[in-house]
Image (cartoon, rainbow, N blue to C red):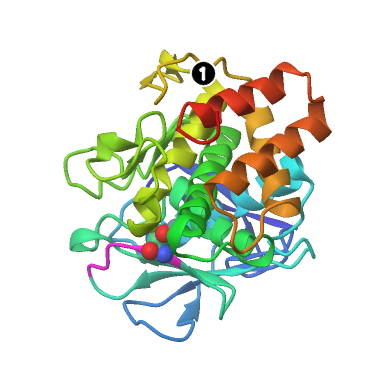
């Protein structure tokens, strides 16, 4: 077992799983590998390798830095699913995926592909804001999990639930990792400055704060982009975890409304994550919509805590708070 040192852009100095003399091959996590595309857009480029076991210098000018961030994000996501949900690897088979960084030129996105079972990161605007933050890495890797479990179709309401699943577990991973440089929060992409003004990509307490996402379900929500129809499910997860109203968590202020004006009492993030994970892996199917997600999570809450439990009631109240069921 080799442990290298990563000098990351977003998480400070971290320990990385590496292979002898040396490469970004995480032998303790299914041999997950991280490759350098060097601004190409196909193939795997080159595996990050070098004579020392120190990776990056914390700046985007050093090509290894994005590799270190991506490798760390994959490792934390692996550890989260293994230690919190008992799932070893995306497929649950102990086998790692792989990451590719430095995709294209000024490319402002990151993505998962089922075809390669891999995730890919652009370097962002000016090639100095790589999309390799921990929450983005967890978001992309979770697309792989959804693909091999519920298989939620990536359009309409199921597409919104697919996107929300990636945001929900991105928050789960960030709170699990909870470093000083990147404490857990209910924001998505707050480190990558994608808007250029320091605001995050998405807000889970009140999704409409991004100007496009929806706070509550309505009959036409299946017609909006999946990154906006995810809003109500992200909002449901926040309400279930923390409850409605104003609250500060890890120094971030939130203020979560409900669509029916009724209060929701949260049950804590850990239980909310367990409920969503079990629903995703045992109840949801490719065509699950918002109404079916409500039914599925209520069934899971009943199995885990009982139909007369406060947890079951909170799940129902949180769905009512985004205009589903009631
Ligand atoms: N980064 C985006 C996402 O994972 C890429 C896409 O639109 N699928 O949602
Ligand atoms: Zn996504």
- Residue receiving disc 1: 243
Residue 46, how many percent across, how many down? Answer: 48, 80
Q: How many marks?
A: 1
Q: Does 248 lie within the magenta span?
A: no
**Picture residue at 17% right of the left edge, 40% below the top:** 197
Residue 305, how many percent across, how many down? Answer: 80, 26
Ligand 2 rendered quadrant: bottom left
Residue 105, how many percent across, how many down? Answer: 24, 73
Q: Main secondary structure of the magenta part?
A: loop
Q: Does 110 lie within the magenta span?
A: yes
Q: Residues within 10 Å of mark 1 (few under 14, many from 20)?
A: many
Is residue 156 in view? yes
Residue 302 quadrant? top right
Q: Secondary structure at mark 1?
A: loop
- Vertical position of residue 231 compared to residue 186: above or below: below
Image quadrant where one finds the N terminus:
bottom right
Q: Which residues are magenta?
A: 106-111
- In the image, 9 versus 294, the foreground residue is 294
**Picture residue at 70% right of the left edge, 35% below the top:** 298
- In the image, 286 versus 173, the foreground residue is 286
- Vertical position of residue 315 compared to residue 100: above or below: above
- Vertical position of residue 235 compared to residue 10: above or below: above
Q: Is mark 1 within 8 Å of ligand 2?
A: no
**Picture residue at 37% right of the left edge, 50% below the top:** 221
Image quadrant where one finds the C terminus:
top right
Residue 268 quadrant? top right
């Amino acid at each position: 077992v080799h442990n290298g040192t990563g000098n990351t852009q977003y998480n400070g100095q971290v320990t990385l799983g590496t292979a002898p003399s040396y490469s970004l091959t995480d032998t303790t996590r299914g041999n997950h590998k991280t490759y350098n595309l060097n601004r190409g857009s196909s193939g795997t480029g080159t595996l990050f390798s070098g004579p020392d076991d120190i990776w990056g210098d914390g700046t985007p000018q050093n090509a290894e830095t994005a590799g270190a961030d991506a490798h760390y994000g994959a490792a934390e996501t692996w550890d989260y699913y293994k230690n919190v949900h008992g799932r070893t690897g995306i497929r649950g088979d102990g086998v790692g995926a792989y990451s590719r960084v430095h995709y294209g030129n000024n490319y402002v996105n990151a993505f998962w592909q089922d075809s390669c079972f891999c995730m890919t990161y652009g370097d962002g605007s000016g090639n100095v804001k790589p999309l390799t933050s921990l929450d983005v890495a967890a978001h992309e890797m979770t697309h792989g999990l959804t693909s091999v479990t519920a298989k939620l179709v990536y359009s309409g309401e199921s597409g919104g639930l697919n996107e929300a699943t990636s945001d929900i577990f991105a928050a789960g991973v960030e709170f699990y990792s909870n470093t000083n440089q990147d404490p857990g929060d209910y924001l998505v992409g707050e480190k990558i400055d994608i808007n250029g003004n320091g605001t995050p990509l998405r807000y889970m307490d009140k999704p409409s704060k991004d100007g496009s996402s929806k706070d509550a379900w309505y009959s036409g929500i299946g017609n909006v982009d999946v990154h906006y129809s995810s809003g109500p499910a992200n909002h449901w997860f926040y309400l279930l975890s923390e409850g409605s109203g104003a609250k500060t968590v890890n120094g971030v202020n939130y203020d979560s409304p409900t669509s029916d004006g009724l209060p929701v009492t949260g049950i804590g993030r850990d239980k909310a994550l367990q409920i969503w994970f079990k629903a995703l892996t045992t109840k949801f199917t490719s065509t699950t919509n918002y109404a079916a997600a409500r039914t599925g999570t209520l069934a899971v809450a009943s199995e885990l805590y009982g139909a007369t439990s406060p947890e079951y009631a909170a799940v129902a109240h949180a769905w009512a708070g985004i205009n589903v069921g009631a």
